[in-house]
């Protein structure tokens, strides 16, 4: 079941109401962080709230979502930020992911930041009720599905920001999609063992999913850029930045389960926050030359270019077929 929480300070349903609720005429930026009940997701959500963002918290259990909301609001303090919505949805179910998107669209008039952070590391091969290997479904299918369903709202937000001087085809790129990959990747996509049908290794499955996440992000960027360039009128798609990152080697539950304590502590893991906000770019918007990039330690490591072009297109076709989600704006 889904349940929604709304803090009293952020109960408004429209962007203008949100501005009034926080005592300012400037529209508050809204961020959805998937998997934000612990680890890097919770840390990122807390930092966003502390910097004045309205945060949408997502998790798999009511108890953990409640605890995360309390933590995020406590860290936000009197910054004006805080939880504006919370949803309990399990990405083991593609329908749950669809329902999350529908609820966000229904309850939130704007969406500036989408952090596709949720992910799993599975010790054994598990097939979901949808018929997919769980790592592939949660780490790859769901981000594709969720992004596709929420992209229209992201573009609407970019267009509205443009109307107030922040974008509208001017290249501000302050609406952002962050796809969390990993430095742990395979060299290429194995389409003959896409869901570990032939052989399963927990590390290989996870690394394979993160390779696909990076290539999905590259392909998404290229399609957004191509669509933005069509026609003679400035497009709000120009103001949507697509980024991918390695979040760092961080001692989360996932890292401890798979690799042991070999990273930094969660409170030091600021990469996602800095890429989602202006921090990484010197208080400026994402420059044209870095949009679509893959970042490691907040440093641009790779740009789409012609990287695995055929594999990217083939992967996109598979994700479209398996989710039934198309991207009509692209």
Image (cartoon, rainbow, N blue to C red):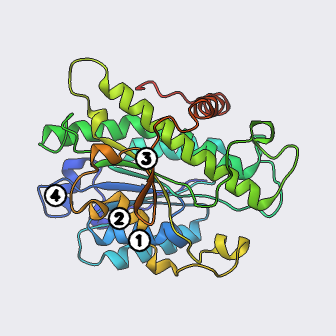
80 or 254: which is nearer to us? 254
Classify 10 Å Cα crowding around label 2: few (below 14), some (14-19), many (20 and above).
Answer: some
For marks 2 and 4 on the same chain, the one whose residue lies earlier in the sequence: 4
In front: label 1 or label 4: 1
Asked whether, in this view, residue 38 is left or right of residue 196, the answer is: left
Q: What residue would you read off at disc 1?
A: 270
Q: What residue would you read off at disc 3?
A: 104
Q: Residue at left 56%, top 30%?
A: 325
Image location of residue 327, percent across then percent down: 48, 28
Classify 10 Å Cα crowding around label 3: few (below 14), some (14-19), many (20 and above).
Answer: some
Image location of residue 68, percent across then percent down: 48, 72
| SS of the residue under disc 4 | helix
Image location of residue 179, percent across then percent down: 49, 51
Asked whether, in this view, residue 56 is left or right of residue 121, the answer is: left
The image quadrant that residue 50 belongs to is bottom left
Classify 10 Å Cα crowding around label 4: few (below 14), some (14-19), many (20 and above).
Answer: some
The image quadrant that residue 47 belongs to is bottom left
Classify 10 Å Cα crowding around label 1: few (below 14), some (14-19), many (20 and above).
Answer: some
For marks 1 and 4 on the same chain, the one whose residue lies earlier in the sequence: 4
Q: Give the distance between the C-alpha atoms of the residues marked 2 and 4, in whole angstroms.
A: 27 Å
């Amino acid at each position: 079941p889904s349940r929604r929480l709304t803090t009293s300070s952020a109960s408004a349903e429209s962007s203008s109401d949100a501005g009034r609720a926080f005592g300012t005429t400037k529209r508050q930026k809204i961020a959805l962080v998937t998997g934000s009940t612990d680890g890097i997701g919770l840390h990122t959500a807390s930092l966003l709230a502390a910097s004045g963002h309205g945060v949408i918290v997502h998790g798999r259990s009511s108890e953990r979502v409640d605890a995360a909301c309390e933590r995020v609001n406590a860290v936000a303090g009197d910054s004006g930020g805080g939880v504006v919505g919370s949803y309990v949805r399990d990405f083991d179910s593609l329908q749950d992911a669809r329902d999350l998107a529908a609820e966000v669209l229904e309850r939130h008039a704007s969406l500036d930041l989408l952090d596709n952070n949720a992910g799993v590391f599975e010790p054994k091969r598990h097939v979901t009720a949808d018929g997919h290997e769980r790592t592939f479904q949660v780490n790859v299918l769901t981000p594709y599905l969720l992004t596709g369903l929420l992209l229209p709202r992201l573009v609407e937000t970019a267009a509205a920001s443009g109307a107030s001087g922040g974008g509208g085809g001017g290249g501000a790129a302050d609406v952002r999609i962050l796809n969390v990959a990993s430095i742990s990747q395979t060299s290429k996509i194995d389409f003959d063992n896409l869901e570990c049908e032939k052989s399963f290794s927990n590390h290989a499955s996870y690394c394979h999913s993160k390779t696909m996440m990076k290539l999905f992000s590259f392909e998404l960027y290229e399609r957004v850029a191509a669509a933005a360039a069509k026609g003679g009128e400035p497009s709000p798609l120009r103001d949507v930045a697509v980024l991918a990152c390695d979040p760092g080697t961080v001692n989360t539950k996932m890292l401890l389960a798979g690799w042991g304590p070999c990273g930094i502590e969660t409170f030091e893991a600021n990469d996602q926050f800095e890429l989602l906000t202006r921090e990484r770019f010197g208080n400026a918007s994402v420059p044209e030359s870095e949009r679509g990039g893959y970042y490691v330690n907040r440093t641009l490591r790779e740009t789409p270019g012609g990287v695995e072009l055929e594999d990217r297109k083939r992967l996109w076709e598979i994700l479209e077929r398996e989710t039934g989600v198309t991207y009509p704006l692209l």
